[in-house]
Amino acid sequence: MLLAIDVGNTNITIGLYLDSELVATWRVGTDRARTADEYGLRFVQLLQREGYRPADVSEAAMASVVPPLNARLVEACKTYLGVDLVELNSLCKTLPAVHYDNVGALGTDRLVNAVAAWEIYGAPAGRPVIVVDFGTATKLECVSATGEYLGGVIAPGINISTEALARSAARLQRIEVARPRQVLGKNIVASLQSGIVFGFAGQADGLVKRLSREIAPEGPAPVVVATGGLAHLVASESRTIQQVEPYLTLDGVRRVYEKNRPE
């Protein structure tokens, strides 16, 4: 079984795959102070909670945007699971072509999202794909109908924006991100929720429309796929997002690992 790990700035998302089937998922906070032993013990506990043993894991792969944690996670997998954790990067074999000024600087999470979305939705339909990832940052990735990575957009994410607002504005507060009853807010909480949910949906729609005009001025329109922890909430208010895949990044980790599996 393959343990796929997506290391983000806020959370580490972990998936266990039996061939191509995702059989278990977990999400833990990204803690830069945690040791290899602490991560290793956590992996064992999570597996056992779902009825699996460390010995059930035969392979492991990781896409990470937090380099200081990489060596500790590699050690954790080796010591506690007995497997070598493969660190994926943007120089791995992925799409038919990658058009980016400095491919080595392209975030692995962005690229694995692009791979999974194109293989699931773009290639079968012969259409371009736009991925919208609502994570710590809001990231959009564009792939042509023939599987060429074309570039993307990065903007401040929902959690970063709300935390910055709460820190900088004395009368505002941290709130639960939820859909308000209407756009017009009658109190601080409802006003903030409206700005977050409808505002980020509008931002995504505006960027998708602009990107669509650039990458597909003629021919079939792109399939727009959303992922990330708050994807369901924002996608429900979007006019352009067509598909929601909560574990798209994990699936991308699996797909890229399989293309680059050690002999």
Image (cartoon, rainbow, N blue to C red):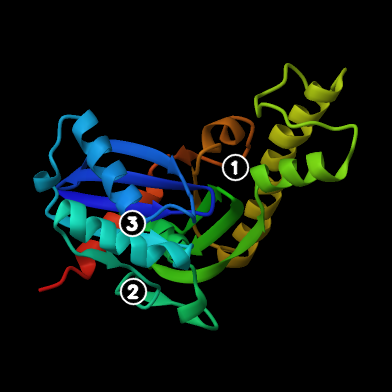
Marker disc for residue 230: none
Label 1 close to label 3 by CB (< 8 Å): no
Secondary structure of the residue carrying tag 3 is: helix
Nearer-the-camera pick, 124 or 261:
261
- Which image quarter is the C terminus in? bottom left
**The label number, if any, that marks residue 36 in the structure image:** 3
Q: What percent of the width, then of the height, locates residue 100?
A: 52, 78
Ranked by sequence position, the earlier of labels 2 and 3 is 3
Q: Determine the image quadrant of residue 76.
A: bottom left
What residue sits right under mark 1 in the picture?
Answer: 240
Q: Where is residue 97 in the image (x, y as percent from the top left)?
A: 39, 77
How far apart are the alpha carbons under marks 1 and 3?
A: 42 Å
x, y (%) of residue 225? 48, 46
Nearer-N-terminus badge (2/1): 2
Q: Which of 63 and 197 is in front in this view?
A: 63
Q: What residue type is labelled 2?
A: Pro
Position of 65 with respect to 134 (left or right) is left
> Is 253 displayed left or right of 196 in the figure?
left
Position above or below: 141 against 89: above
Of 126 and 191, which appears nearest the observer? 191
- Quick one: SS at disc 2? loop
Select label 1 or label 3 by which is in front.
3
Q: Mark 2 points at which residue?
A: 96
Report, in whole angstroms, how far the alpha carbon at label 2 lies from the one at label 3. 36 Å
What residue is shown at x 90% (from left), y 32% (from top)? 171
Task: Determine whether 171 is above or below 106 in the image.
Answer: above
Q: Which amino acid does label 3 sit on?
A: Ala
Task: Report the front residue among 215 and 37.
Answer: 37
